[in-house]
Amino acid sequence: MSAVGDAPAHLLEVEGLSAWYERDRPVLTDVSFTLEAGEAVGLIGLNGAGKTTMLTSLCDVHRGARFDVLRYRGREVDPGDERFKAARYLSLADDSSFPTWNLDAFIGFLEHAYRLRPDRGRLEELIEGFDYGRYRTTSFSRLSSGSRKKANLIAAFYLTTPLLFLDEPVDFLDFTATEFLYRSINDAAASGRSILLSSHIAESFTRCTRRLYVLSAGRMTGPLTTPEDSDAVAALVS
């Protein structure tokens, strides 16, 4: 029998995350959760609950945060550590970065930044799945919100980082793109990636996750087994 100390480490372990924009007005208080390889985990909460702040704190975008514990593969890390940065990718709900770039330029940048060998077959599969072909040479600043979201998601699933954080990925997507998104999330988990899926849309969780966390007024509860019914998911934050 294995000793307790020999138990395999979580892929990601977070304890005591607190975040703020003003020190005396915390946005997150004592948030703790774990992620395992090969799973999609839900993060549900109403708008303003702190979901985006939590994800940006993990990725060193939001600096007004502290962690009691932050471990990746059992090793203590800081959000700014290069090894941890290379292991994660964040697709934000509202991303206005690189406005003059198009998809091809963005993908080229990511291939260099993540030292990823180009896979044109995979890229074309994602472009077709998200119905983005007509926009691939269009600068991001000229895209609709839905098309800009598709570009972000193509990048997210083109990369192979062990950790993938998706912030409200369904927003602005049409039905066909939403279905392809759900399939891509499930395929990514099956390939061994760990996906943290933030949303206020109940169907996102019933289609893609087995467990979820609830974020309300800056505090986390869970993990909970994802209900099979969307109404039961919605009731968790009602």
Image (cartoon, rainbow, N blue to C red):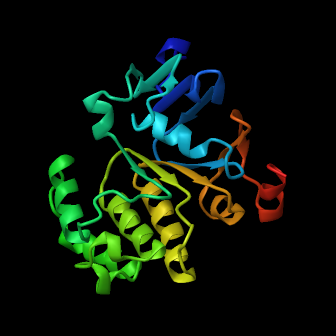
Extreme residue toward the bottom, this view? 134
Given residues 93 and 202, the one toward you in this image is 93
Q: Judge left or right: residue 224 versus residue 55.
A: right
Given residues 186 and 237, the one toward you in this image is 237
x 20%, y 70%: residue: 104
Q: How far across and down, in percent of the image, does residue 34 sit?
A: 56, 33
Looking at the image, can residue 113 be seen? yes
Q: Above or below — where is 214 with respect to 189?
A: above
Q: Above or below — where is 70 with respect to 195?
A: above
Q: Judge left or right: residue 234 versus residue 118.
A: right
Q: Judge left or right: residue 206 versus residue 126.
A: right
Quadrant containing the N terminus in the rendered view? top right
Looking at the image, can residue 3 be seen? no
Q: How far across and down, in percent of the image, does residue 30 sit?
A: 65, 23
In which image quadrant can residue 201 be found? bottom right
Q: How far across and down, in percent of the image, does residue 90 sit?
A: 41, 49
x 85%, y 52%: residue: 238
